[in-house]
Amino acid sequence: MRTIKEIAAIANVSVATVSRALQRPEVVSEVTRQRIQEVVKRLGYTPNALARNLRTARTRLIVALLPDIANPFFSEVIRGIEQVAHESGYSVLLGETQSSLVREQAYADMIAARQADGIITMSHRVPKIPMPGRLPVVNACEYVKDKQISSVYVDNVAAAGAAVDYLVMLGHREIAFIAGPPSSPICVDRKQGYRLALQRAKLAVDPALMVSGDFSIEAGERAVELLLSQGQSFSAVFCSNDEMAIGAMRALSSHGLRVPEDVSVVGFDDIRFARYTSPALTTIAQPKNALGREAMAMLIELLADPEVPPRKRVLSADLVVRGSTAPPSPRKRK
C-alpha cells in the first residue's frame, strides 16, 4: 500500500501539504495541487476510509500554552503561531498557565476529550495527555528532554556567551549576571554561557555577582538593589531577559549610576520595548516570529502524519548593539 509520506517525497512537498491537497484542495496552490494529484494518480494511491475519517474528525483548534501572557516576548511568538495556523485553516486558543501544573493539565485534557487537536507549549514541561501513540505536542522557545517531543529554540549557551564575550571585548572585567528561574533549562543554559565566556577570558566566576530572578522588571530591580547593598563592584550587568534588564537600568538610575557611563547593561530577547529604553538596550535578539511559525508548522506536520520523526530545531540568535553598553569608565578599568 502506498502512503501519504511517499506521495510527499515524490511530489517534493511536506506531508501536511499533501494532506491539505487531498482534504482541503482550495487552500493549496493550483500548481502544487496538480503535481500532487499527478503523483497520486500515478501511484494509484487510495486513502484508507476509516483512517481518513479519524484524521479529519478534527476541531481545527490548537492550544498555545504560555506561562505569562504579560511577558511581551511571547506576543511575537504567538503572532508567528497565528500566521501559520490561519494559513492552514486552524484557530488558536491561548492558555496562560502562570506556571501552574493544574492549569496546564486542564488545557491538556482538552486534547484527550477531542476539544482541540494539539498543543504548543512554551514552557519546559509537557502536560500528561492520556491517549495512545505519539502526543500531538510541540515545544517552543524552551526545550524538553523527551526525545519524542519536537522542539524549536535557540542555542542559549552560545547566545549568552556572545553577550558576555562582547562585554569582555569592550574591556569589562567585573560582569554581574541576573539569571532566570533555575527550574528552566534555557536559564540554566544562559548561566552556563555566562560562565563559559568568563572562563574563555580567564576571568574568575564570582558567585557573589550572580543573582536569580523571575523574568519580571521588578526582579531586575531587586537584583541590582541586592548587589549594591552587598557592596559588590561591577561595571556591567548581563540579564537573562530584557524585562529584568529594564528593571536593572531603573535601579541603577535610582542610585545615581549612569548607563552606560558607569554600568553597561545587556538583555536577552529583544522585545519591542528594548529599542525604546533610554538608552536603548543592547540585547540578544531571538527570532520570535520564526519560533512561532516553525512550532506551528511542526505541529501541523505531526497532525497530518503521527509517524513523522520528532525534531529538535535550533534557530540562530543575534547580538544587537545599542546604547546601553560602552567600555568601562577609567575608574572601573583593571
Image (cartoon, helix red, strand yellow):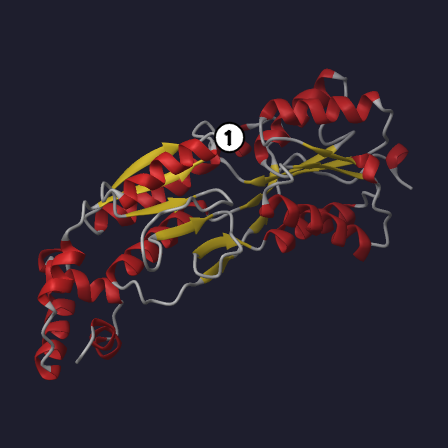
Please state which of residues 82 and 57 is positioned toward the viewer in this rendering.
57
The quarter of the picture where residue 23 lies is bottom left
- Identity, as a three-letter code, of the amino acid under mark 1: Phe
The quarter of the picture where residue 113 lies is top left
83 w.r.t. 201: above or below: above
The quarter of the picture where residue 12 lies is bottom left
Find residue 75 and report its horizontal and vertical position in percent: 41, 36
Please state which of residues 149 and 277 is positioned toward the viewer in this rendering.
149
Q: Residue at 50% of width from left, 52% of height from top?
A: 153
Find residue 288 and report its horizontal and vertical position in percent: 45, 45
In the rendered view, does 255 fall on the left or right side of 244? right
In the rendered view, does 67 fall on the left or right side of 300? right
Q: Which residue is mark 1?
A: 273
Please state which of residues 327 and 9 is positioned toward the viewer in this rendering.
9
Q: Residue furthest bottom?
A: 42
Number of marks in picture: 1
In the rendered view, does 42 fall on the left or right side of 166? left
Find residue 151 and report its horizontal and vertical position in percent: 45, 55
* Quarter of the image where the C terminus is located: top right
Q: Residues within 10 Å of mark 1 (few under 14, many from 20)?
A: some
Q: Residue at 65% of width from left, 40% of height from top?
A: 182
Task: Describe the element under mark 1 as helix, strand or loop.
Answer: helix
Q: Residue at 56% of width from left, 51% of height from top?
A: 318
Please state which of residues 177 and 264 is positioned toward the viewer in this rendering.
177
Can residue 29 be seen in this snapshot?
no
Can residue 261 be seen in this snapshot?
yes
Find residue 72 and report its horizontal and vertical position in percent: 46, 32
* Quarter of the image where the N terminus is located: bottom left
